[in-house]
Structures are given as structure tokens and as C-alpha cells.
Amino acid sequence: MNQPPYDPRYLAGVRHFNDCDFFEAHEAWEELWTDYQGPSRKFYQGLIQVAVCFHHFGNGNTRGAIKLYHTSRAYLEPYRPRYEGVDVEKLLDEMAVCCRDLLAADAKFPSIAIVPDLIPEIHLDPPPPAQSGA
């Protein structure tokens, strides 16, 4: 049960995501994804795409949000129920609730606004160790 500490870029992405700064979350996770070649690579790619989905949704690019919704789920499904401290099951469920009206729309470019209260947050378990000097 001696888990190595989380990569600082991973933690930065989580912080940005929870602050609804999805572009910056994407940037942090993409830097990690670019350097990483192990079994978590597609997991990081899924998180990147979740962030981009919400970035597009928040900016009114609903067509892009729908596309990234589906691709992010495809990347994250194999990592259910938990991976790298993330309750993947919960994240995907909350993402589905947040995007429900968007996905149900018949229009090619649906005019649906994101509901801020429905945006998921990521809480790592185990939590990251306390940062000294931060």
C-alpha cells in the first residue's frame, strides 16, 4: 500500500479542473501525457479529453463538447471503477449528468449552456501528501 507520490503535473491538472480552469487542466495533463509511456497513458489522455469537453461546453462549442464527451469516456472506461486515486465510475456518472441535456439535443449545434453546479470535481483517494512550504 506504499503508493508513490502523485506527479506534480497530475496534481496541477486536478487543481485546475476543480477550479473549472479546464484549459489549464488540459495543459498540465497533456505535459504529463507527452512525457509518459506507461500503463496510465490512456488514462491521462481520457482526463485531457474530459477537460477539453468541459472547456468546449463552457465556451458554447457544443458540437466539440459532444465529440470529446464520447472519446473521453472511451479512454476512461477501461480504468473503472478507480484508478490513480480517481473514482472513475463517479467521474463518468457525474459527467453524464452534466452533459445529459447536451447529448439529448436533436440540433446539430445545440444551444445549451453548461450548468456550473453539475460540473464534476475530482477528489483523489488517497489524497496527495501535504505539500511542505506551499
Image (cartoon, rainbow, N blue to C red):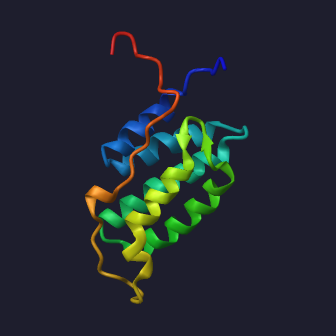
On screen, 92 above or below 114? above
Could you say where residue 81 lies in the image, as x and y percent from the top left? 62, 48
Could you say where residue 51 lies in the image, as x and y percent from the top left? 44, 53
* In the image: residue 3, left or right of residue 103: right
Residue at screen point 37% across, 59% down = 55
On screen, 134 above or below 35? above
Residue at the extreme top of the image, as rendered: 133
On screen, 78 above or below 8? below
Could you say where residue 134 lies in the image, as x and y percent from the top left? 33, 16
On screen, 11 above or below 93? above
From the image, which quarter does the N terminus lie in? top right
Residue at screen point 47% across, 72% down = 66
Residue 64 picture quarter: bottom left
Counting labels gives 0
* In the image: residue 71, left or right of residue 40: left
Residue 34 picture quarter: top right
Could you say where residue 120 lies in the image, as x and y percent from the top left? 39, 52
Residue at screen point 58% across, 45% down = 44
Residue at screen point 27% across, 56% down = 117
Out of 34 and 104, give the one closest to the viewer.
104
